[in-house]
Structures are given as C-alpha cells and as structure tokens.
Amino acid sequence: MKNEKLKLLRNFILLSIPLVILCVLAYLLPMSYMTTEYVMWDEEFENSASPYIDAETIIIGDSRAKSSVLPALLHEDTYNIAIGGATPIEMYYATENYIEHNGAPENAIVIFAPYHFCDIDNWDQTLYFNFLSIDEIAEIYIKGVQTGDKVIARKGRIGEMLSYRLRLPSKYLAQMYESRFVGRKAENMAKFDSIREDMGYCEFGSAAGDDGETHEVYHEVFDSSAEVLYYYEKLLELLSDNKVNVFVAQPPINKASGDAIHKEFLDGYSGYLDYVKDKQDYYKMTMLTEIPVYPNDLFGDSIHVNRKGAEVYTRELREYLESVGFWD
C-alpha cells in the first residue's frame, strides 16, 4: 500500500512539472507571446510602478484618449498614460500608482468614451494581462458584489481570477502556442519603443476614413454601470486630493455615429457629468460635456481617429486649453 501511494505521488509530481513550467513561462515571458494590445498595458504598468515619468501634464483615459491626443503636439512635458480597453476602474488604480511612484502632476486631462460608463467590456482582458494587484482586484470584486455588477462579480469569477493570477495553462497555453512561445517578442518590443517615442500616444485605426457606427449608437439611454461611476468619481477625487488641475474632455465620434446616436443617451450622459461637476468642490476642474463630431475621413476605424484625426483633435484641444489659461 505504501509503495502504491509513493508511486501515485511520483506520477503526480511528474505530471505536474510540465504544468508548473508552463505557468512559470507564462509569468516570465508575456512580451514574447501576448498580442500587441498587451504592450500598452505593460508600458503603463512600468510607468505606474516606477519613477520613469516626470510629466507636468498627463492624459488619463481609454483607447480614445490614447489614440486622440498627441502629447508632443499638445504641450511640452506631457505624457499619455491612457490604456486601450480600460475603464475608469483600471485608470483609477493606474493613476493612484502613478502618483505614488512619480508624484502628482500639475495637470490631468481626463477622456473616456461615453459607452465605457455603461459597459465593462474588457474586464477579462484586464485579468488576463494581470495589470492589477491582488488587493486591487479584491476591492473591485467586493464593490462589484455590493453594486450587483454582472461582469465583475458573476458566478465563478473568483475561480477565474485565481486562474489568471496563477497563469494556468487553461488561460494562456493557446496564446503561447499560437505565438510559438516567443514569436511576438520583436514585434511587441518595437511597439513598446514606438509608444515611448510618442510619449504614450498609440494609433489604433490607420484607415483613411471609416463610416461605421461607434458603440454609443447601440445604447438608447445612458444605462450606466454603478461600479464604473463609483470609480470615475473616485478618480476625480484622487486628482482633486492631490491638487491636480483637471480638464475633462470628450473624445470625437465620426459623422455616421453623430447622425445615429440617440438623444436620450446624450442627455443622460451630459446630465451625469453635470451632476459630477456639481457634486463636490473639486480642487480645479473644467468639464466639457459636448461630444465633438468629426468627418468620417478622420477616423482609422469606427471608434478611433486616425493620426490625421488625432492631429486635428489635439490642436483644437490645445487651442481651447490655451484660451482658458489651463497651463497658466
């Protein structure tokens, strides 16, 4: 009987070794097998976790902020720490960690797509990239339980979060196999360097125009997420508590989307922003609620402006901020 147990233990250990090796490789080599989307998260993780940046002005937001604002064209000493796919949830912790390791900037420009107040559509990606700490994920999950969020706190979520944290093959092996384990390293490192050279800017769509409709069009009303709103206000309070001069801007949408978007959605969204603006006495905050509508040829896909569109948006943003003395 004893020999049988030892044999079973030996077999179990032998079977576990390849799994452990895969978990270790998944942990150590993400830039070698992850898709290009991961690069933005890794670049921002490094910005948040170490004193790399000493910027006077930072851009905070999602992929529309990342692709719409060219720091070099906006103002000197500016860096774009927005992340493609992020909501105010992830950006609250990114900003908190940034301030902890780099100190508070003098100014922050906050830009989120309106639909990101309604849909937590990339939470699995956040978990997959392991951008947040265990403590941060726990806080978000507890808040999700309190708000009844069906994405953050759905049944089986704890087991999934543990699987991502342990880098189990069930979550990562397919991606590792597809990239042949190290096949994407050169491409990802080049993308990382490109983002750094552009001071955080990253182009998402590169087409010479797009007349597709954006996500906001599919919301008849502003059916917001309580979890997202909580973290959005928490983000603004964090900036206010650190005496940061804040400007809340709206990213542009193309004409096709501007023609199709529901008035009830726009009214609900602008009404919420007005509520936030009047809710408390922020340190210094200016907010624009109107969503700019640009010609279709300034969009690289249905959601994001191309580089030409980013140049137009950045110049207009710079002119407005200069007119109100934002940097004075």
Image (cartoon, grey):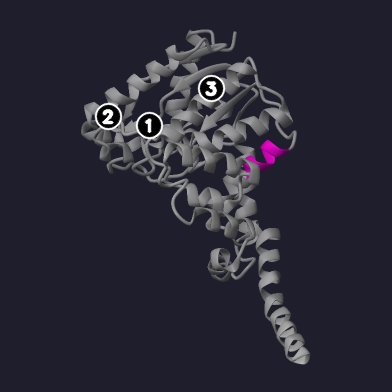
Q: Is residue 89 above or below residue 28?
A: above
Q: Residue 112 location, x and y as percent?
A: 45, 31
Query: What distance separates the C-alpha of mark 1 from that of mark 3?
Result: 16 Å
Residue 220 in view, yes or no = yes
Tell me the residue at 55%/63% (across/down). Answer: 171
Q: Which residue is found at the position 49% from the left and 8% from the top?
A: 324
Q: Quadrant of the N terminus?
A: bottom right
The magenta segment is: 43-49
Dot 3: what SS? helix
The residue where tag 1 is placed is 114
Residue 18 vertical placement versus 301 (above, below): below
Name the residue type under label 2.
Answer: Phe
Q: Is residue 268 left or right of residue 129?
A: left
The answer to the question of whether label 1 and label 2 lie on touching residues, with beta carbons closer than 8 A, is yes
Residue type (three-letter) at the residue carrying disc 3: Leu
Res. 23 image quadrant:
bottom right
Q: Which mark is residue 236?
A: 3
- Separation of disc 1 and disc 2 at Cα? 9 Å
Q: Which mark is residue 221?
A: none
| Mark 1 or mark 2: whose residue is earlier in sequence | 1
Q: Is residue 266 left or right of residue 48?
A: left
Q: Which residue is mark 2?
A: 265
